[in-house]
Amino acid sequence: MCDTMVIVQRDRVLFAKNSDRDPNEAQCLDWQPRRDYPTGTRLRCTHVEISQVPHTHAVLLSRPYWMWGAEMGANEHGVVIGNEAVFTRERYARSGLTGMDLLRLALERAATAQQAVDVIIELLQTHGQGGGCGHENRRFTYHNSFLVADPRTAFVLETAGRHHAVEEVRGARSISNGLTIRAFAERHSDIVKTRVSGCRARRLRTQHLLERSETVADLFAILRDHGPHSDRPRYRLLNGGMSAPCMHAGGVAAAAQTTASWVGELRSCESRHWVTATAAPCISLFKPVRIDEPLDLGPTPTDKADEQSLWWRHERLHRIVMRDPARLSPLFAHERDEVEARWLAEPPEPAAAFHTGDQMLADWIDRLNAKPSPDRRPPFVRRYWSRRNRWAKLELGASMSCTAMARSNV
């Protein structure tokens, strides 16, 4: 489950996305340089093999660790894409290109948003979409919608099997886990699954906030939003915290967690991108990245806790804070907001920003360890997270070493 949004302004386009997936499904940043390939080269995607093109563009991807494709990403030409799971009445194929595959292929092959839309449609018609897309349930599958943008324009592309519909964006536009192009939705939407996803409430919320937003900082705030009149997650028995853009897992029928977040400021002269590279944007730090500047963020994380990857180092903070966010978040949130404000005014070098973020993360965990707090979440949420911590072999009672926590990423 995810939320993606865009604002088309006179001189730039703003893009934002939360990627919501299973809680232990670590997400990594993946820099891929431009490449040339000989004729006849084959390409292995997540589930299927297709023909490779002669040339691919440089891309930066945010992808679930086990997938070839990506949840969101950008390329060297200023194209950025986010995808959404959508549920339709069309048949779900056992194999095919996943929505994440289609996203990455479009970024690697297109130099404009319109070209990216055309690439996805052509691949959809040629290869179809399908195959397992879940981590805990590898048979879980869905169809996809996309928000595709470049410095001048943006498009919503929605699919149902091999069918599709496209709408150019004017002003502010958000999408979630339901079809939104009216006539297309009326023909293809699966009403029950769409309702369980909680997407209607989230899209109403993000669209409302988006229409009142103008800056990158405003988009940070939307991705951190827990709903009206709430500064912390609210859990429902059926689907946990899936009613708000900043999603927190815990439902008994459906559950997803925001595992990575991205904001892009797209301009014809230079685009800027800000990522968390961690779960839970409400307690994460947005850091600058560049498409052509790979960073060492430690080994690629998996679904098992480790001390070396950024994603899992932050996960310790995340899972402790969520026990009692009203009491624990204020221990560091103000400091984080001040740092982000300075960085937005004068962006630092990416490597320096990630290094500073690691040092802050180590300090924040020390503060939490000094102020233990009981878990105030509902019992069904505590049970849900106890099981995921056990699967990840994450012992919250034991502290990681400060040396590992503050490891330099330069």
Image (tube, helix red, strand yellow):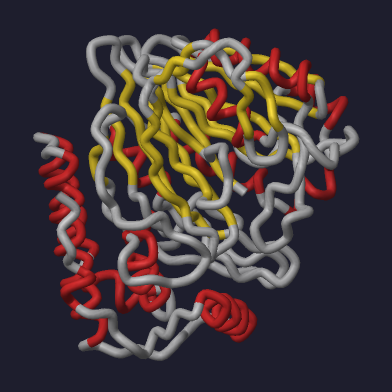
Instruction: Give the residue drawn at x 32%, y 38%.
Output: 218
Instruction: Give the residue drawn at x 52%, y 36%.
Output: 4
Q: In the figure, is residue 157 to the left or right of 189?
A: left
Q: In the figure, is residue 26 to the left or right of 388?
A: left
Q: Position of residue 159 (x, y in %)?
A: 74, 26
Q: Can residue 228 be seen in this view?
A: no
- Image quadrant in which you'd find residue 350: top left
124 vs 241: above or below: above
Front residue of this view, candidates 79 and 5: 79
21 vs 190: above or below: below
Instruction: Give the residue drawn at x 56%, y 51%.
Output: 66
Front residue of this view, candidates 58 and 200: 58
Q: In the figure, is residue 180 to the left or right of 308?
A: right
Q: Position of residue 21 (x, y in %)?
A: 58, 54
31 vs 1: above or below: above
102 vs 375: above or below: above
Q: In the figure, is residue 285 to the left or right of 393?
A: left
Q: Where is residue 171 in the image (x, y as percent from the top left)?
A: 46, 18
- Image quadrant in which you'd find residue 94: top right
Q: Can residue 364 be seen in this view?
A: yes
Front residue of this view, candidates 215 and 52: 52
- Image quadrant in which you'd find residue 114: top right
Q: Position of residue 357 (x, y in %)?
A: 19, 56
Instruction: Give the residue drawn at x 72%, y 34%.
Output: 48
Number of marks present in the image shown: 0
